[in-house]
Image (cartoon, grey):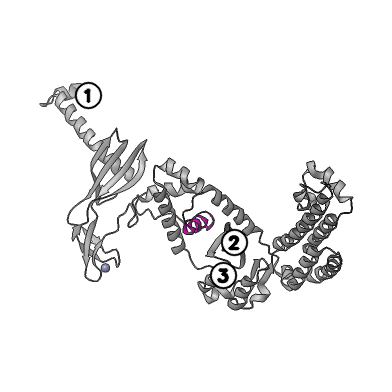
């Protein structure tokens, strides 16, 4: 090969230098065009590496004499002018933060006036390329906001902004779907009786709505956003015995009262609370006489009997054998769980009557009160045998929300909290479109 070049009129060294220059010049711009996934008419015009600043800046430019589309109506138009140069954070090049720079072209549409065209690498107004946003979304899904800011080298506000935009995009792109089985639940968000109302799709396990407060209006606001078809096709709604929610369903959902199922976990929650009240009183009475046998036993009585950890079993059996008020309350509570094991509503109702007699004759005031509450709401407890739903899914979502709350300590406001719930539990398509960019 060398021999052949030697025979040329131009010396080998000159050709080699020229080639190297050519390859060198090509290497950066072509490489970045490829890495950025830029397609015609966009090309890379300049690449600057700042080793000290740990960053790469890439300028992109387009050919002349092209037609551009109005972002509103798609009409092809000639170039009007360019906006000021802007930059977008892109995926890092190895450890170097990488920024893409361009002057966005503008068109003058006869209908819409002067408009900036859509750029293939970023959503309008974003400070990041679509590929960077995708990565950021993936990272934010896996870790807390603070952790994500460190991994991605972005600010706290930027991280939240990416999440907000992603949620907005996901909600906007959501198609109208019928939630056949719905769970409605309240969520305490702060001390001092601050609540949020959360509605979810029990089949998909997704949060569909987050509203502030737990009033009738709070839930009605969700129903107002649904179409007639969506409202009609709701088959069942699991919830707590909470009158404002009941009122909202009665007002807004056709045949709503047939569809409410008081959730068994909530019902049992009320009875558990009654057991705990009995224990507290009894324990206090004992302590007044210097008897500590019930002290520290709170959780023993709240477990379902098969879930009691082995290490507590001995103490629990001893306590149970003492014929305490708390023991009786516990037995009544445990017995009620049988209600949901029946095959038909008729048998469940028969069981209820027996249980109710036992509970209301127990001379345990909190238990009597709980039994009365259940009695008043019985019709919609027994709807369970028609719909067979429980709010277990939304309890799962609740614990996820609890984690979100812990992870993102530092919600600066409730909107952030809401954003995080939808981001993690909304089942939304959060990603930006990447246009021509492979990704
Ligand atoms: Zn237009």
- Is the residue under label 3 in contact with that under label 2 (CB below 8 Å)? no
Q: Nearer the viewer, residue 402 or 124?
A: 402
The residue sitting at 24% across, 71% down in the picture is 111
The residue sitting at 64% across, 76% down in the picture is 256
Determine whether 244 is above or below 337 in the image: below
Residue 136 showing in the rendered view = yes
Q: Residue 110: name its quadrant.
A: bottom left
Q: Nearer the viewer, residue 243 or 97?
A: 243
Q: Which residue is mark 3?
A: 219
Determine whether 116 is above or below 407 in the image: below
Lower sequence index among marks 2 and 1? 1
Foreground disc of the pair 2, 1: 2
Q: Seen in the image, is 132 located left or right of residue 345?
A: left
Q: Position of residue 421 (x, y in %)?
A: 52, 56
Q: Which residue is mark 1?
A: 1
**Cα–Cα gap, marks 2 and 3:** 17 Å
Q: Which residue is mark 2?
A: 193
């Amino acid at each position: 090969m060398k021999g052949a070049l030697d025979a040329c009129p131009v010396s080998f060294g000159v050709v080699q230098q020229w080639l190297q220059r050519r390859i060198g010049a090509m290497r950066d711009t072509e490489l970045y065009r490829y890495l950025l996934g830029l397609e015609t008419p966009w090309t890379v015009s300049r690449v600057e590496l700042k080793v000290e600043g740990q960053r790469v800046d890439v300028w992109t430019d387009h050919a002349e004499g092209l037609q551009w589309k109005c972002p509103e109506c798609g009409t092809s138009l000639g170039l009007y002018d360019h906006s000021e140069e802007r930059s977008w954070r892109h995926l890092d090049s190895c450890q170097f933060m990488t920024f893409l720079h361009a002057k966005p072209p503008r068109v003058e549409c006869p209908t819409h006036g002067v408009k900036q065209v859509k750029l293939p690498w970023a959503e309008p107004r974003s400070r990041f390329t679509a590929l960077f946003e995708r990565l950021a979304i993936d990272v934010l899904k896996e870790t807390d906001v603070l952790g994500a800011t460190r991994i991605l080298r972005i600010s706290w506000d930027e991280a939240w902004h990416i999440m907000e935009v992603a949620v907005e995009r996901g909600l906007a792109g959501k198609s109208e779907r019928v939630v056949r089985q719905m769970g409605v639940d309240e969520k305490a968000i702060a001390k001092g009786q601050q609540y949020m109302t959360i509605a979810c799709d029990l089949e998909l396990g997704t949060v569909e709505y987050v509203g502030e407060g737990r009033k009738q209006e709070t839930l009605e606001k969700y129903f107002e956003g649904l179409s007639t078809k969506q409202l009609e096709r709701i088959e069942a709604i699991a919830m707590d015995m909470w009158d404002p929610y009941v009122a909202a369903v009665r007002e807004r959902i056709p045949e709503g009262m047939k569809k409410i199922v008081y959730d068994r976990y909530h019902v049992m929650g009320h009875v558990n609370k009654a057991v705990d009240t009995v224990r507290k009183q009894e324990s206090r009475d004992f302590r007044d006489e210097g008897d500590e046998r019930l002290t520290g036993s709170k959780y023993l009585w709240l477990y379902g009997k098969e879930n009691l950890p082995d290490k507590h079993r001995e103490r629990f059996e001893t306590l149970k054998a003492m014929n305490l008020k708390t023991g009786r309350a516990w037995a009544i509570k445990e017995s009620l769980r049988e209600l949901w094991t029946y095959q038909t509503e008729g048998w469940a109702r028969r069981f209820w009557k027996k249980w109710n007699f036992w509970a209301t004759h127990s001379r345990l005031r909190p238990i009597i009160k709980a039994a009365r509450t259940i009695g008043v709401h019985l019709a919609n407890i027994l709807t369970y045998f028609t719909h067979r739903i429980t709010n277990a899914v939304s309890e799962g979502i609740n614990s996820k929300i609890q984690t979100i709350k812990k992870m993102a300590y530092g919600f600066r406001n409730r909107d952030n909290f809401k954003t995080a719930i939808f981001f993690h539990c909304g089942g939304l398509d959060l990603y930006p479109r990447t246009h021509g960019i492979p990704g």
